[in-house]
Amino acid sequence: MAVLDALAEWPVDNVAAAVIGGSGIVSSHGDIDRVYELASVTKLLVAEAVLVAVEEGALELDDEAGPPGATVAHLLAHASGLVFDSRTVMAPPATQRIYSSAGFEVLAETVDAATGIDFAEYLRQSVCEPLGMTDTVLDGPAGHGARSSVADLARFAADLLVPTVLSSEMLDRATRVAFPGLDGFVPGYGKHKPNDWGLGFEIRGHKHPHWTGANNSPETFGHFGQSGTFLWVDPRFGRACVVLTDRPFGAWAKPLWSEFNDSVCEALGDWRLSTPTTQDS
C-alpha cells in the first residue's frame, strides 16, 4: 500500500508499520522486527490474557476485584473508579470512565492469585506463545510495560480478526461497549460524552478529536501508547493497522496519526471496491 510511504516523512528516528488481514500482513513499512516500547498498547495484550483466564475458568468477569463494589469487568473497562496511577478511588464503580493504569496492575495481581502463575509468564503462555510472538515481553507494569515488534503485533491483530486465542463470543463481548453511557477522558484527547470502552479495548464510537481517523468506523477498537504507538482493528474493512515509533506521543502525533489513518481507510475502501470477492477472512 503506497499510503504507508507517508511514514517516511514522520518526524521520528524509527517507525515500522503494517496493515493486517485475517491471514496476516497485507503491507508493511520499515523494519517490522525492530522492538519498540509499547506503553499503553500493552493493555491490549494484558486484557487478552485476562480474558483467557476467564475462559479457562480461573476467574469470572463478575468476580470482585479492586475497590469495593468493582469487578474484573469494571477494571478492564476503566469503570472501577480507580484513578490513573494509584489505588486511590475517585468514584463509585460504573459511574465514570476513569482511565486507570493502576487498574491493570490490579488485574495482573488478580490473575496471578487465581492461577498461581506470575502474570508476565501467564501472558507469555496464554497469548504470546500460541501466536508465535517471540519478540514480545512484559518487563514492567501491566498497564504500560511491554515491548514488541510490528511482526508480533501483526500476529496479534490478525487473531483479533479471526480469533483463535479467545472464542469469537468472548472477543465480541470484549470489543463492544461495556457499561454504556459513561463519560470520561481519553489521555491527550480530552473528555468524551460518552467515552466508549470495551473490556480492555478502546471503542472509537463517535469521539472527536481522536487518534484514529474520521474514516474509521465507530466499531473500530484498539489502543494507543504514549511511546508513540498504536494498533486498531476496523471490522468494517476486516483490516487492522499497527504503527510503532520511538518518539513519545505529543503535539507532533495528533495531526499525523489521524491523517494517516484516514488515508489508510481510504485505501482500504478502494481495495474493497476493487476486490469484492477476494477479501481474506
Image (cartoon, rainbow, N blue to C red):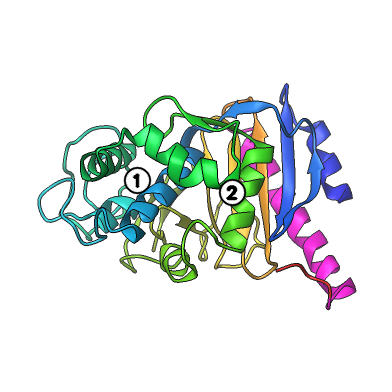
The vertical placement of 108 against 160, above or below, is above
Picture coordinates of residue 103, whole percent (x, y): 28, 42
For the question of whether residue 43 can be seen, the reply is no
Q: Amino acid at mark 1?
A: Tyr
Dot 2 falls on a residue whose secondary structure is helix
Front residue of 255 and 175: 175
Residue indicated by mark 1: 99
Disc 2 to disc 1: CB gap under 8 Å = no
Distance Cα–Cα, label 2 vs label 1: 23 Å
Amino acid of disc 2: Phe
| In this rendering, the label closer to the viewer, 2 or 1 | 2
Taking the spot 55% from the left edge, 53% from the top edge, the residue there is 209
Front residue of this view, candidates 151 and 230: 151
The magenta span reads 250-277
In this picture, residue 53 sits left or right of residue 243:
left
Q: Which mark is residue 156?
A: 2
Q: Residue at x 55, y 62 (%)?
A: 163
Q: Residue at x 85, y 67 (%)?
A: 270
Q: What residue occupies the far bottom of the structure in this picture?
A: 277
Quadrant of residue 100 within the rendered picture: top left
Secondary element type, mark 1 = loop
